[in-house]
Image (cartoon, rainbow, N blue to C red):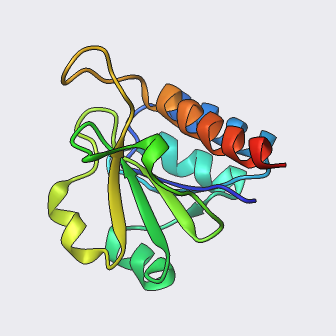
Amino acid sequence: MIITVLFYHPKDIKNVIDIHNLLNSINGKLIIIPRNENPEVIEYCYKSGIETYLNFDKFLEVYRDRKFLILETYGNKFIQEVNVNENSIIVLGAEDYGFPKELLSKIPDYEVVKIPMGIQGGSYNVVTCLVILIYEVLRRKYSKD
């Protein structure tokens, strides 16, 4: 199974590099919608061959038919309550403001999911969140075999 991740408006180039390396290690795919004011991320995407879109609407023109799993603190389901498959795109929001709720209305098929936390309203680093989600996906996949 190929895990596809959209990272929306990343702020920190180190997180982009870590997520890119993580996904490469499991044959996953990274897609970026960069911030306009972050040339370092744009340059890294270009040099690394990461699929990049200028805005969310352009991205949706290509991926509208997919199931979106938006990983956010405002999620209404836990990651263990949803299925991730080849048709899923995992969406990670910006490190400082997440994935904007106003974009949800543009997505035909989505679920907003969260990671169980001991502290209400707390959050993990974006890379840590993805690692936890990938672990859950792979745990399920291999426990069925």
User: Is residue 63 rendered to the left or right of residue 21?
Assistant: left
**Residue at (46% x, 53% y) in the render:** 82
User: Is residue 125 rendered to the left or right of residue 86?
Assistant: left
- Quarter of the image that includes the N terminus: bottom right
Q: Tell me the quarter of the picture where residue 31 sits.
A: bottom right
- Rendered location of residue 33, percent (x, y): 43, 58
- Rendered location of residue 62, percent (x, y): 50, 82
Q: Is residue 127 above or below residue 20?
A: above
- Rendered location of residue 27, percent (x, y): 79, 51
- Rendered location of residue 68, percent (x, y): 43, 64
User: How many marks on residues?
Assistant: 0
Q: Tell me the quarter of the picture where residue 71 sits.
A: top left
Residue extending furthest toward the top: 118
Q: Is residue 19 above or below residue 77?
A: above
Residue extending furthest toward the front: 144
Residue extending furthest toward the right: 145
**Residue at (57% x, 49% y) in the render:** 43
Q: Is residue 75 above or below residue 124?
A: below
Relative depth, front residue between 86 and 141: 141
Relative depth, front residue between 101 and 11: 101
**Residue at (71% x, 42% y) in the render:** 138
**Residue at (63% x, 45% y) in the render:** 137
Q: Is residue 50 above or below residue 110?
A: above
